[in-house]
Every structure is written in structure tokens, then in C-alpha cells.
Image (spheres, helix red, strand yellow):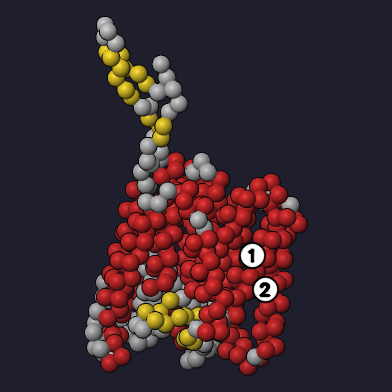
Amino acid sequence: MKAPQTSNKGKPDFFLLIMTLILVGFGIVMVFSASSSIAVVSSAFNHDALYFTKRHLLFTAVGLFAMFFIMNLPYKFLRKNTKLYVVPVLILLFTVPFLGVTKNGATGWFEFGPISIQPTEFAKLALILILGKFIIVKGEQFRTIVHGLIPTSIIIISVAGITMIQPDYGSAFILIVTACIMVWSGGANLKQLFAVGTLVTVAVSLILFIAYLNNPSSWDYRFARFLAFQDPEKYMQDQSWHLVSSLQALAHGGFTGAGFGEGIQKLHYLQYPYNDFIFAVIGEEFGFIGSALFILFYIIFIWRGFSIAVRCPDPHGLVVGVGVTGLFAVQAFVNIAGVTGFIPMTGVTLPFISYGGSSLLVSLMCVGVLLSISREFNKQVQPKVEVVKTKTRKETVYY
């Protein structure tokens, strides 16, 4: 006799988990290499060579706890309770330009004692969860202009626009591209995707124009950075100093690298070598071979993330999984392309590798979401077994 089957608790994707731990471990090593020589000579860091490393380890511990916690939450709980994360993050995001702390010309942080929180980083995951829920709730209507694509564009413009006000153009660009990837994975065709992209582009251009009218002098520096990107050598004593230092680091690394800890450009030449320019330190110390292996490892990580997304039986899991993995891919590309001079520098971190509490914490939370999604398709359907005794024999019943 047979009856309906039950499902046991699925196992997480251990391949992705192991790759994440390797990336995080490598990030700890590189933060130490890139920051120790700066911290040890500065009274601001208590002359402690491990100043940044210890803080990075603290953020890593918190991030790993968050990752394992989210990984063990039922995916249906994550889908139904999106607002528990999204609402407080959006409140922080929309208040930080007016109440936050200004660093490097951008008002994008809240400080609580020694801890700084950057709401924009948390907003990246929030936007993914919002769009994932919206796309699935709308169903077939998502492909319509009025009920689907226009509201989607408004959501993207709202989150990206408040990010640009800070201003944080690099994160805004990442948010927009990640959102477009999700729109495409949600079923929009190329014409509809083009319509969303056009609407968002027009709105973003209007925001930039208003920002320029509000403070024209602040755009002199940004325009100079663009000119420096076009001709780094011409502006190497000013705006392109750090880009030229980055390129010199990669050139010094050559094919095999200068050796771990032997980089020169991190010695007060590169700006934030432990953060924005950490890939330049990797290139200098491990060379072309080491950099290529690192990028290959990252590509495999991203491939695994997309594989988890497309294998999820739940449509919401597919869209959110594609969004999370797309976020990693876009942000890694923007960081590495900026460091190597293919695009202007935007000041975004390299996920898992760069020093930065909010970035690392959100990256590990995103992996937790992916691992939770992976448990959906890893559920093994097993029959429930019961032994029934009769007068003449024992009978095994499956149901």
C-alpha cells in the first residue's frame, strides 16, 4: 500500500559553501598584507599592524553567523517575511543622506561608536528581495507596461536615486544593472527590458542634472576624474595618481608576482589598498598567474550561484538567486575593471576580499540566501516506512 510521500530537509550546496569560505579566508590574508604596513606607522591605528585585520576578523565572524543563520531558515519563511529585512533597511537608506556621516565627499554612513554602517550595501540585498517578491506576485501582469514594468522602474529609480544623492554612483550603477538582470530573468523580453532601461536612464539623467544645478562646483572633481581615466599619464600627479599607482602595481607583479607581502605600491602610494585597490595588491604580489587563477575561481563561484538559481523549483527562488549572483558578478567586474583602468574608478569593494564591514556582512548574507535556495532543490523525497503486524506475518507499508 502506498500513500503520499513526504520530503526531508534538504542539504545546502556544500560546493558553494566551501568556495565562499576559501574566498573569505583569502580576503583575510590579503587585508593583512595590504594594511599592515600602513597601520603600523600610524598613530590613528595605534601603531598596530593587525588593526584592520582584527576588525576584518570581527566582521567575518558576524557575517558567517548571519550566513549560517539565514541558510538554516526555511526558504518559504524568507519569501513570506521579506518586509522584516526590507523595511528597516529602506528607512536607513532614505535617511542617511540627511542624517549620516560624510566620508570622502559622500554622506552614506551611520556611526555607532567604533562601528560604521553603510545602508547602501544592505539596500543591494533589499532591492533584490523587493523585486523578487514583486515579480512573482504580479505573475503574467509583470510583462505588461502599466502593471509590471513601470512600477518596477519606479522601484529601481527610487533605490538607485537615493543612492546617487549621497552621492555613490558606483553602487547606483550596480543596483541598476543587477535589477535589469532580475527583470530579464523574471520573464521580460528584450523590448520590455529596453523600455525599463530607457525609463531608468532618463530618470537617472534627470537626477544627475538636478544635482549639477544644485552644486555645479562639486562636479569639477568628477569631470576631472573622467578626464584622468581617458589620459592617466597626463593627470598622474593629481586625479589619476591612484590609477597610475594601481597600473604600476600590476606591471611590477609581472607574470609570477613579487611574492606575498612584497608589494611596493601598497606602501602609501595606493589609496585604500586594503579596500578599493586590493586587486592591485593581489596583482602585484601574485602576478598575472595568481590574478588569473583568482578571477577563474571567482567565475566558478558565480557559475555555481547561477546554477543554484536555475535549478530551484520555486520561481521566486530563481529570480532572487539570479539577482544575488548577478550582484556578485557586476560588483566584482566594476571593481576589477576600475582597478585595471578599463572603466573609471567608482570606489566599490571587491566582494569577500576588500576590507569593509557592511560589504562583507551583506555578501555573506547573500550567500546565506543562496544556500537556503539550494536546499529547496536538494530535498530528497523519501517514503515513510511503517511495519504493521498481522496475525500471520509482519508487513512493511510504504506511504
Q: Residue furthest front?
A: 391
Residue 43: x, y in percent? Answer: 27, 92
Residue at mark 2: 204
Residue at mark 1: 155
> Relative to the observer, which residue lies in front, 322 or 240?
322
Residue found at x 48% / y 92%:
237
Viewport quadrant of the N terminus: top left
- Density class for disc 2 (Cα within 10 Å; few <14, some 14-19, many ≥20) is many
Q: Is residue 359 left or right of residue 54?
A: right
Q: Residue furthest top?
A: 392
Viewport quadrant of the C terminus: top left
> Relative to the observer, which residue lies in front, 323 or 262?
323
Mark 1 or 2, which is nearer the eye?
1
Q: Quadrant of residue 27?
A: bottom left
Residue type at numbered disc 2: Val
Residue found at x 54% / y 73%:
91
- Density class for disc 1 (Cα within 10 Å; few <14, some 14-19, many ≥20) is some
Circle 1 sits in a helix, a strand or a loop, which is it? helix
